[in-house]
Amino acid sequence: MFAAARAGDVAVPIGSTQKMGVGVNAQLRSIALHHINCPWRPADIEQRDGRVMRQGNQNEELGNYRYVLEGSFDAYSWQTVERKAGLSRRSCAAASTSARSTTSATAPSRSPRSRPSPPATR
């Protein structure tokens, strides 16, 4: 199916995050991505978006659509995943900053040339 999509013989491939995820190379002619449901993990959204928005796509403009049924749990799900993604980004940034400050705090502060010279002998 993916070869047919790359060749232009299949216009609308439909699949789950797992089936259309890692290892799928179908971005050549992709023009849009439609999220019919909301996964619980931000990484799944990144994986889905990565199937379309990547190098090698012949189209300069791409659509990214998320569907929410009014009065359903959908809006809450999308907000929850967005919150998770924000928390993850902030945690990673804080860990990275903390690691850098720890590294610089434990690094030697003197170079070999700054050692005090031995006392002069007469």
Image (tube, helix red, strand yellow):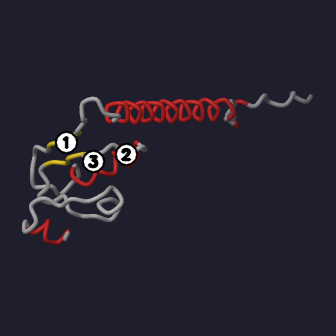
Q: Depth check: give the residue in front, 101 or 18.
A: 18
- The Cα–Cα distance between marks 3 and 2, rounded to whole angstroms, is 12 Å
Of mark 2 and mark 1, the one earlier in the sequence is 2
Q: Quadrant of the C terminus?
A: top right
Q: Secondary structure at mark 1?
A: strand
- The Cα–Cα distance between marks 2 and 1, rounded to whole angstroms, is 15 Å
- The Cα–Cα distance between marks 3 and 1, rounded to whole angstroms, is 8 Å
Q: Secondary structure at mark 2?
A: loop
- Would you name the residue on which mark 2 appears? 39
User: Hey, which residue is sitting farthest right in the picture?
Assistant: 122
Q: Depth check: give the residue in front, 41 or 110.
A: 41
Q: Depth check: give the residue in front, 73 or 26.
A: 73
CB of mark 3 within 8 Å of CB of mark 1?
yes
Q: Amino acid at mark 1?
A: Asn
Left or right: residue 97 compared with residue 61: right
Between disc 3 and disc 2, the foreground one is 2
Residue 38 pos. (x, y %): 33, 43
- Would you name the residue on which mark 1 appears? 64
Residue displayed at 22% across by 39% down: 67
Of mark 3 and mark 1, the one earlier in the sequence is 3
Between disc 2 and disc 1, the foreground one is 2
- Would you name the residue on which mark 3 appears? 49
Residue displayed at 32% across by 31% down: 75
Q: Amino acid at mark 3?
A: Asp
Residue 9 pos. (x, y %): 7, 69
Q: For residue 57, what is the image quadrant?
A: bottom left
Q: Amino acid at mark 2?
A: Pro
Left or right: residue 13 compared with residue 93: left
Residue 29, label in figure: none
